[in-house]
Image (tube, rainbow, N blue to C red):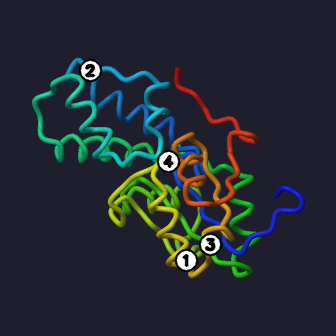
Amino acid sequence: MPDGLTFDAIIFDCDGTLGDSMPMHYVAWVETLTPYGATMSEDEFYAMGGWPTKIVAQTMLDRFDIKTDLGTMVKHKEKLFVQKLSEVPPVPQVVEVVHYYHGKIPLAVATGGLPEVCLGVLKSIGLSPKLFNTIVTCEDVQSHKPEPEIFLEAARRLNVPPDRCIVFEDVDPGIEAARRAGMVSIDVRTFYTPRRIT
């Protein structure tokens, strides 16, 4: 933690922050889109970081005029990702923060992912959901990052004022969401280089 930083709670993004899972999400998207002749670059994928799967899927359906059901695409993509969970390593510096502060201050996860996917990532990197006071997912909010709603909901559940929360994030939309929530953020990319597929 930076010197002089004071806070009463910590909120962690999941994908790319607790676990280096974004590369496997990208591979799952490529495998999902390829049969439709659709493409997504890795830079495009990261620009949508923090978006719920259904929003990314709808974006791809609209962009490439893909004739398939939104729910079918979401379910297929997440199934492919779950099959790759064994390839997701932890982000060690962030996991260390979880263990250090567990039981000392409230901790939360705030993710744009689905509940079952978040729990799968936590399990794959050896973190029990019980380490966190609450887990907020895309199913708990109406708006997604860079909107601040998910972080504000986490703070509400923790009963800690937003300006007393610190956020760990790994993508620009998440950093912006924390800023809009009035929270200090730590960009994981400043000390951990995520893997790239391309």
Residue annotated with mark 2: 38
Residue annotated with mark 4: 86
Could you tell me if the residues under marks 1 and 4 are in contact, i.e. CB atoms within 8 Å? Answer: no
The image quadrant that residue 120 belongs to is: bottom left
The image quadrant that residue 29 belongs to is: top left
Dot 4, how many residues are within 10 Å of its Cα: few (below 14), some (14-19), or many (20+)?
A: some
Q: Residue at x 45, y 63 (%)?
A: 119
Dot 2, how many residues are within 10 Å of its Cα: few (below 14), some (14-19), or many (20+)?
A: some
Give amino acid for label 3.
Leu
Q: CA distance from mark 4 to mark 3?
A: 25 Å
Q: CA distance from mark 1 to mark 3?
A: 10 Å
User: Does residue 45 sit above or below 116 in this rendering?
Assistant: above
Of mark 2 and mark 1, the one earlier in the sequence is 2
Q: Position of residue 113 (x, y in %)?
A: 40, 53
Of mark 4 and mark 2, the one earlier in the sequence is 2
Frontmost of labels 1 and 3 is: 3
Give amino acid for label 1.
Lys
Residue annotated with mark 3: 107
Where disc 3 sits, the SS reads strand
Is 41 left, or right, of 17 in this rendering? left
Of mark 3 and mark 2, the one earlier in the sequence is 2
Q: CA distance from mark 3 to mark 2?
A: 39 Å
Where disc 1 sits, the SS reads helix
The image quadrant that residue 67 belongs to is: top left
Could you tell me if the residues under marks 1 and 3 are in contact, i.e. CB atoms within 8 Å? Answer: no
Q: Which mark is residue 130?
A: 1
Dot 1, how many residues are within 10 Å of its Cα: few (below 14), some (14-19), or many (20+)?
A: few
